[in-house]
Image (tube, rainbow, N blue to C red):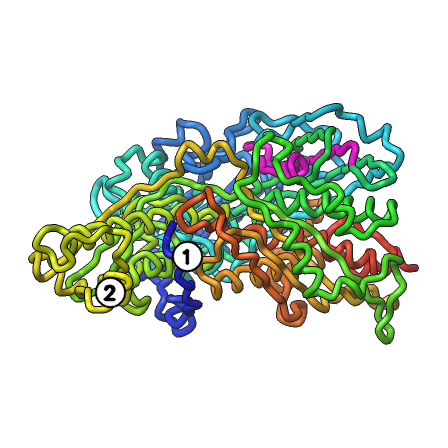
């Protein structure tokens, strides 16, 4: 374990750069002789291109090429399944259809690229793209999940979605039963930064890429596969990212196409997609319908749970996520069954989004728990406590740490849960109905493999390096603090370099896993430096000769003997004595096999107070308290910011976010930021964040479990539960818009 020094609540290390324009995002890079590409999308959702007139575009000013299925340069690795997506949990290849960008006149989804226009400026490429005329042989498109639920299939390897413990139908025999159906719409990540790539072939087989990716090593591998070249010859840079939320967890076909076209035209080529293209070409949270069955005794003990989820995917690829997983281990219950299915529609493929499937599943399970508590006439926290489990009932093993009871209690105090009335619709504030709701969230705490390098220089400064991209959660800040906690070097003398494949290999930024993975590697590299310093000082003839390592403390650039004030040596001096200009350590870090004896999860509890206007149906989140049991909090300020960000996303999921398809055409009706409503300042109250901040004794040397996803998982359920408490009306279909509340109140 590291010394339990107080984590300094430092500011975000890149905050100033981000707000002053110093941070360079992929689209900020300009290269000599660079060309610009613009995608032309299909106007139908299913069918075939019957004619494609590119003549006008080709002769428009500044145009360098128009690429369609008739002249797209080959992508050699695409003989392999599905475009060489990279490491991590990769979408599974599928059989019925194959999608290879610009490889055939077949149209599989609305907005599918039918041409990529390249010109010497973005404006000229955009103009030329507008001149392309296509005609289509149109077929009826199946885009409505609700209509096609009966056509669902069981995907292969669906994250263990089909599960049984005890008897599948035990809930039916319970004295108190509940069956409820929940649905969530398509949601789109909508980060501020537009998606795209800048590709530069620096030699015949060497490539420089500036991309919007959550994993530079993953993009490197994907391109190496696609172009059949050695990953070592591919350099990927993504130091900053203007929000990912999951869309950058894979390499998308249009990115690979841009790389291929850049090679063909012999110039660096940039693609910056439009906002509306980001609704179809970089994934979304899939439309999902769920049924929950609960059976309980009258004393509030659960007898059986069944959870079935059906989600949309594309015709050409199965995307699966862990929608039903929480149900398997969250509550003590002898009989649990889950089922997970997909419906293959004429739509573009989904991807993980913000707390991904777990957030979708938590909305259903935690709404149902609230409904059951109401049936049992129990306080929703009391109902959860009666079914609390200290060990993981799915795997029959202990949790590495679980302080959820404390989280319930702290959150309840902070929101003023005592003011909640068991009887719904019984509190008013002026013309508004007032209600309280809560929900639990949970997400895996991972310990992935990662590498990091630490360099201590003779001037007392430290540089820490890792390829990991900081997509916004404050990874660089957390790594700085971890290095500080090991070496005692002041944070302003520590520099973190990240987001580049020239640095030690790191996993993709996602799954709330990076402080655990890369943080451990930084911890180990810094520990190796510390050991070297201690050896140099304590060896025979050294300034602290004969001392044991555990007597020595490193702080503020000085190695000293604890309890003996006079005995010390400055790190700088020590390095000089030994003629060292730098101590340079690289460490690979992964969890020990003992981790397998534990279930590792981060937990959260969300509490909200809502006001509901009975005349207009408007729901306002008046107060939000989110409590995280995510182990030791390494960086208190950025952790709190991340929680606020997650809750903001949760408010959007609960109340405003929905990508609407006009099923007559299979097209989006609101694919702009004006019409797709992410939560804005006026929707977001002051959010109180509380951290249990108890180190996990197992997962990694920091005791930090990770906390990105749990900031959002469960939040929408807490809002739905609060709306019920305020009005007595249950909305099971997100988002909870005024029309749905009105219908219920009328
Ligand atoms: Mo996240 S959905 O792991 O980017």
Q: Secondary structure at mark 2?
A: loop
Taking the image as shown, residue 184 lies to the left or right of residue 481, namely right
User: How far from the left and from the top, in percent, is residue 53?
Assistant: 49, 45
Q: Residues within 10 Å of mark 1 (few under 14, many from 20)?
A: many
Q: Which residue is mark 2?
A: 564
What is the tally of numbered marks visible in this picture? Answer: 2
Residue highlighted by disc 1: 475
Magenta range is 302-330
Q: Examine the structure image and report whether residue 314 is included in the region drawn in magenta.
A: yes
Q: Is residue 578 visible?
A: yes
Q: Is residue 469 above or below residue 619?
A: above
Residue, x 70% and y 42% (percent of image)? 388
SS for callout 1: helix
Name the residue rendered at 50%, 29% in the picture.
Answer: 93
Residue 140 image position (x, y, % from top left): 69, 36
User: Which residue sits at x=87%, y=73%?
Assistant: 431
| Percent of width and height locating residue 629 | 57, 52
The CA distance from mark 2 to mark 1 is 37 Å
In the visual, does 173 lie left or right of 36? right
The magenta stretch spans residue 220: no
Q: Are marks 2 and 1 in contact (CB under 8 Å)?
A: no
- Which image quadrant is residue 686 in? bottom right
Instruction: Give the mark, 2 or 1, whose residue is nearer the N terminus.
Output: 1
Looking at this view, is 736 or 674 the one in front? 736
């Amino acid at each position: 374990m590291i010394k339990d020094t107080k984590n300094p609540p430092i500011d975000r290390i890149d905050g100033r750069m981000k707000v002053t324009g110093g941070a360079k995002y992929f689209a900020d890079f300009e290269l000599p002789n660079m060309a610009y590409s613009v995608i032309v999308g299909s106007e139908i959702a299913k069918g075939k291109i019957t004619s494609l007139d590119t003549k006008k575009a080709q002769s428009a000013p500044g145009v360098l090429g128009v690429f369609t299925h008739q002249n797209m340069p080959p992508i050699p690795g695409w003989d392999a399944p599905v475009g060489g997506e990279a490491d991590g949990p990769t979408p599974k290849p599928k059989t019925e259809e194959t999608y290879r960008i610009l490889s055939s006149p077949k149209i599989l989804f609305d907005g599918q690229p039918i041409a990529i226009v390249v010109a010497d400026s973005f404006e000229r490429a955009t103009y030329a793209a507008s001149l392309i005329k296509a005609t289509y042989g149109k077929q009826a498109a199946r885009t409505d999940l609700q209509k096609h639920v009966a056509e669902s299939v069981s995907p292969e390897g669906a994250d263990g979605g089909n599960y049984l413990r005890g008897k599948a139908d035990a809930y039916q025999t319970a004295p108190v039963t509940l069956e409820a159906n929940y649905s969530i719409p398509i949601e789109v990540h909508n980060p501020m930064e537009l998606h795209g790539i800048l590709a530069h072939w620096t030699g015949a087989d060497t490539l420089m890429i500036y991309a919007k990716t959550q994993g530079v090593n993953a993009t490197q591998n994907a391109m190496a596969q696609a172009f059949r070249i050695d990953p070592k010859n591919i350099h990927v840079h993504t130091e900053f990212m203007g929000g990912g939320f999951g869309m950058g967890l894979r390499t998308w076909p249009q990115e690979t196409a841009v790389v291929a076209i850049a090679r063909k035209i012999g110039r660096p080529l940039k693609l910056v997609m439009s906002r509306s293209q980001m609704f179809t070409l970089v994934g979304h949270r899939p439309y999902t319908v769920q049924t929950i069955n609960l059976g309980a005794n009258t004393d509030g003990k659960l007898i059986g749970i069944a959870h079935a989820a059906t989600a949309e995917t594309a015709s050409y690829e199965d995307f699966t996520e862990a929608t039903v997983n929480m149900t398997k281990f969250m509550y003590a219950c002898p009989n649990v069954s889950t089922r997970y299915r997909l419906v293959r529609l004429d739509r573009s493929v989904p991807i993980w989004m913000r707390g991904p499937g777990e957030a979708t599943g938590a909305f259903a399970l935690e709404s149902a728990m609230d409904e059951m508590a109401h049936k049992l006439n129990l306080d929703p926290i009391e109902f959860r406590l009666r079914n609390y489990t200290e060990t993981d009932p799915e795997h029959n093993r202990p949790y590495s740490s679980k302080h959820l009871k404390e989280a319930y209690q702290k959150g309840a105090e902070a929101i003023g849960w005592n003011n909640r009335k068991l009887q719904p619709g019984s509190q008013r504030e002026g013309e508004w109905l007032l209600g309280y709701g809560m929900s639990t969230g949970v997400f895996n705490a991972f310990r992935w493999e990662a590498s990091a390098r630490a360099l201590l220089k003779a001037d007392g400064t430290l540089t820490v390096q890792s390829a990991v991209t900081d997509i916004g959660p404050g990874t660089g800040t957390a790594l700085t603090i971890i290095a500080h906690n090991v070496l005692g070097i002041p944070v302003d003398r520590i520099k973190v370099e990240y987001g580049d494949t020239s640095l030690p290999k790191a996993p993709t930024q996602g799954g709330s896993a990076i402080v655990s993975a890369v943080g451990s590697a930084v911890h180990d590299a810094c520990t190796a430096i510390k050991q070297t310093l201690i050896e140099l000082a304590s060896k025979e003839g050294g300034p602290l000769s004969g001392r044991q390592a555990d007597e020595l403390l490193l702080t503020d650039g000085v190695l000293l003997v604890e309890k003996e004030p006079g005995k010390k040596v400055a790190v700088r001096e020590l390095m000089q004595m030994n003629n060292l200009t730098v101590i340079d350590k690289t460490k690979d870090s992964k969890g020990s096999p003992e981790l397998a004896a534990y279930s590792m999860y981060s937990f959260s509890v969300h509490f909200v107070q809502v006001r509901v206007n009975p005349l207009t149906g408007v729901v306002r989140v008046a107060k939000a308290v989110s409590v995280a049991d995510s182990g030791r909090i390494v960086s208190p300020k950025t952790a709190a910011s991340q929680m606020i960000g997650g809750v903001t996303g949760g408010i959007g999921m609960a109340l405003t976010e929905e990508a609407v398809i006009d099923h007559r055409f299979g097209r989006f009706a609101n694919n702009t930021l004006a019409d797709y409503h992410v939560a804005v300042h006026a929707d977001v109250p002051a959010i109180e964040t509380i951290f249990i901040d108890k180190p996990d004794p197992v997962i990694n040397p920091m005791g930090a479990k990770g906390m990105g996803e749990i900031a959002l998982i469960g939040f929408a359920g807490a809002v739905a539960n609060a709306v019920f408490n305020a009005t007595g009306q249950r909305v099971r279909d997100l988002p909870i818009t005024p029309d749905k509340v009105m219908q219920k109140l009328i």
